[in-house]
Image (cartoon, coloured by chain):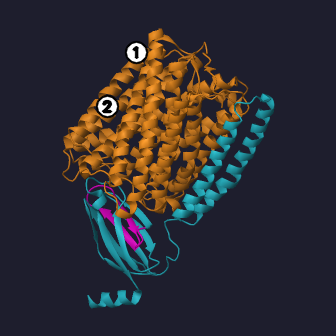
């Protein structure tokens, strides 16, 4: 790796002005939330390690906050990345983005109120009927407030996605065209990667968000009038369908930063090859079909759905490893690209995604799931592809957007911060996976003494991760401030 | 099972790490773009065939023997009702024989709970969910005697981590004697 300055190429087609300002603000807000919620996560691990003592109700409130905050920030960061790059190709409404952001932030305030004032601690997955049957710990009003906050966030994303869908249809004629089917099944020219991926995300997240809104509304009705009861298995299916689609879509949106920024370093354009188009078409269907892998231990589920969930889990991993990762390898290998912080974070992100898929697939085998489900193995795999995967890509985008067109050496202190994030993150993930393999359950406020050493080591790694993340946020803010003074 | 899953995952993860490191240390050099593209295409074709040709039949094979029907589950089972609620387990029997098929009929009076069975070394041996409105039947055969712990594995509120019960697994003769003495 060279110490000399890298001039980050400023692609003239990249959006500037207000679009850039809006995207920079959104990614900074999301990154700030990431760092704050990481600090909450660190506290949770230190409680499990026995370093800090807090009451269980506070633990579960903070666990709810950590989960909902991270999922919300992941959605926001992903949407900011997608929205920014989509502006290269289609005409999006800035007013609609601001409506999205405004509604999203109101939802955030409502949710924080429901947790910190109302005492809601039903976890971000709001698994029916827990929100309204707290065992006397929080009132139904707190649950209603939480659910209304989630609904507001759902409405916010729907506004955003509907505008994206509208713009894609206006430019390309239909979503079938913008996802590249005329090129896949014929000889038409394929749309750019960002367009293909955005189309898949828009389709699945509109459906996923509507499913989520349906169960949230049913839960709200149930809270107001308990005679309106919901089938618990149907509720679980809707919740996990929504949750699975939403969180995966946040990765799909953020990877667009890799499609768009890596070529500026390598000089090799990311192409919508046939295999790329096949990958996204498979992903479109698979991301909606595999959610039953969250329900392997719900024995009332039809067995064929569980088997489909197992096969789907595996097949879903194929595009990530065989298409995205290998494509990245091809674009990077002997490209002459110089490493800097942004490129390193983006590549780390793809690594986190590919690496995290492996324990996910393993847990997606029903016989393994029998002894791994709801152990620490689960946060192990999702921290792998979210903390090291998705968040790294979001940080990479944040650093890049603040520095484009400027000279950027990979300075020693940046390398150190990057190394802290990598080592802390990998250590944290390893401790989750090892804990899971040793049967330590997830979501427990108090751990047995024999489990505490895992959490103690995890706490150390979490401290290192948070320090690395604070540094990334600092670089993001510094870049934004520099850009602001220039313009 | 758990250690095998961990080992398999670690080997594959190290493979991914090795791939990224190899590419990362070769990034700054210049190379022939067309040649690299050709090698990547070949590698991708091989990877796709490997992942589809080997992986898909493997995952199908792993689901062929139904994982919810454990090995050795033969003969007349003992049915144990296991009712759950915030935050307790109410089992119809707290003593069970080793080597005998057991059907746990899992129900809940309030929210979702997870019926996780831990052995004496606190290794998770089986689990299933208890959900409102349904009776989930979990089949299991205890392989060794000892004091087992039932722990909740689905987040159910403030005392989730304290929702524990114990099952004493004894040899079939002791079990039969204790049953007839009751």
Would residue B106 be counted in the magenta stretch? yes
Name the residue: 27% across, 91% down: B181
On residue A95, which mark appears? 1
Residue A403 place in picture, x, y as percent: 53, 19
Disc 2 target residue: A108
Picture layout, residue A303 above or below residue A325: below
Residue A484 occupies which quadrant of the picture? top left
Q: Residue furthest top?
A: A487
Question: Is A313 placed left or right of B156 in the picture?
Answer: right
Q: Nearer the viewer, residue A455 or A96?
A: A455
Q: Nearer the viewer, residue A63 or A419?
A: A419
Name the residue: 65% across, 24% down: A265
On residue A249, which mark appears? none
Residue A343 occupies which quadrant of the picture? top right
Magenta residues span: B103-122
User: What chain letter is assigned to the residue under label 2?
Assistant: A
User: What chain letter is assigned to the residue under label 1?
Assistant: A
Please tell me the colour of chain A.
orange
Would residue B162 be counted in the magenta stretch? no
Picture layout, residue B10 above or below residue A4: below
Please tell me the colour of chain B.
cyan
Name the residue: 80% across, 29% down: B32
Name the magenta segment's main secondary structure. strand
Residue A422 place in picture, x, y as percent: 52, 41
Q: Nearer the viewer, residue B55 or B167?
A: B167
């Amino acid at each position: 790796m060279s110490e000399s300055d890298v001039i980050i190429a400023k692609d003239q087609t990249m959006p500037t002005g207000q679009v850039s300002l809006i995207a920079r603000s959104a990614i900074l807000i999301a990154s700030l939330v990431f760092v704050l919620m990481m600090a909450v996560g660190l506290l949770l691990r230190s409680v499990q390690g026995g370093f800090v003592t807090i009451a269980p109700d506070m633990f579960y409130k903070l666990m709810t906050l950590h989960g909902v905050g991270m999922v919300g920030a992941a959605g926001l960061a992903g949407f900011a990345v997608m929205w920014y790059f989509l502006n290269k190709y289609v005409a999006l409404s800035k007013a609609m983005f601001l409506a999205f952001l405004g509604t999203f932030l109101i939802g955030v305030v409502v949710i924080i109120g429901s947790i910190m004032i109302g005492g809601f601690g039903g976890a971000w997955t709001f698994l029916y009927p827990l929100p309204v049957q707290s065992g006397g710990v929080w009132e139904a009003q707190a649950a209603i407030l939480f659910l209304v906050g989630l609904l507001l966030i759902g409405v916010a994303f729907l506004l955003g996605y509907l505008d994206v869908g509208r713009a894609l249809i206006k430019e390309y004629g239909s979503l079938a065209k913008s996802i590249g089917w005329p090129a896949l099944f014929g000889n038409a020219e394929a749309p750019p990667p960002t367009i293909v991926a955005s189309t898949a995300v828009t389709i699945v997240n509109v459906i996923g968000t509507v499913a989520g809104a349906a169960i949230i509304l049913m839960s709200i009705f149930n809270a107001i009038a308990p005679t309106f009861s919901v089938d618990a298995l149907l509720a679980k299916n809707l919740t996990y369908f929504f949750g699975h689609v939403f969180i995966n879509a946040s990765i799909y949106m953020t990877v667009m930063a890799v499609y768009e920024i890596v070529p500026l370093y390598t000089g090799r354009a990311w192409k919508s090859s046939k295999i790329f188009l096949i990958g996204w078409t498979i992903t479109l269907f698979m991301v909606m079909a595999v959610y039953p892998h969250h329900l392997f231990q719900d024995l009332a589920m039809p067995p064929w759905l569980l088997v489909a969930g197992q096969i789907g889990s595996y097949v879903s991993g194929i595009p990530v490893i065989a298409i995205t990762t290998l494509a990245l390898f091809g674009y990077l290998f002997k490209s002459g690209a110089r490493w800097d912080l942004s490129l390193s974070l983006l590549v780390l992100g793809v690594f986190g995604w590919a690496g995290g898929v492996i324990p996910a697939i393993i847990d997606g085998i029903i016989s393994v799931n029998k002894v791994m489900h709801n152990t620490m193995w689960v946060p192990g795999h999702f921290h792998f592809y979210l903390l090291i995967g998705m968040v790294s890509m979001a940080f990479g985008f944040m650093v890049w957007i603040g520095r484009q067109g400027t000279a950027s050496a990979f300075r020693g202190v940046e390398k150190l911060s990057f190394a802290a994030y990598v080592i802390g993150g990998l250590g944290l993930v390893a401790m989750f996976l090892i804990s899971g393999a040793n049967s330590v359950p997830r979501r427990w406020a108090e751990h047995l003494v024999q489990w505490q050493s895992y959490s103690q080591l995890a706490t150390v790694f979490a401290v290192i991760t948070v320090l690395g993340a604070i540094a990334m946020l600092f670089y993001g803010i510094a870049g934004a401030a520099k850009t602001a003074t220039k313009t | 099972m758990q250690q095998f899953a961990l080992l398999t995952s670690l080997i594959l993860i190290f493979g991914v790490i090795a791939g990224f490191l190899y590419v990362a240390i070769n990034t700054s050099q210049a190379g022939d773009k067309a040649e690299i593209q050709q090698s990547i295409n070949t590698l991708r074709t091989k990877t796709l065939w490997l992942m589809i040709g080997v992986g898909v039949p493997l995952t199908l094979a792993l689901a062929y023997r139904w994982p919810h029907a454990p090995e050795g589950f033969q003969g007349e089972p003992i049915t144990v009702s296991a009712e759950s609620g915030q935050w307790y387990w109410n089992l119809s029997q707290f003593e069970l024989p080793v080597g005998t098929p057991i059907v746990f009929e899992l129900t809940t009076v309030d929210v979702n709970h997870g019926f996780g069975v831990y052995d004496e070394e606190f290794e998770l041996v089986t689990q299933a969910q208890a959900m409102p409105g349904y009776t989930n039947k979990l089949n299991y055969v205890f392989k060794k005697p000892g004091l087992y712990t039932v722990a909740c594995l689905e987040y159910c509120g403030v005392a989730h981590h304290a929702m524990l019960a114990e099952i004493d697994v004894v040899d079939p003769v002791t079990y039969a004697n204790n049953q007839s003495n009751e």
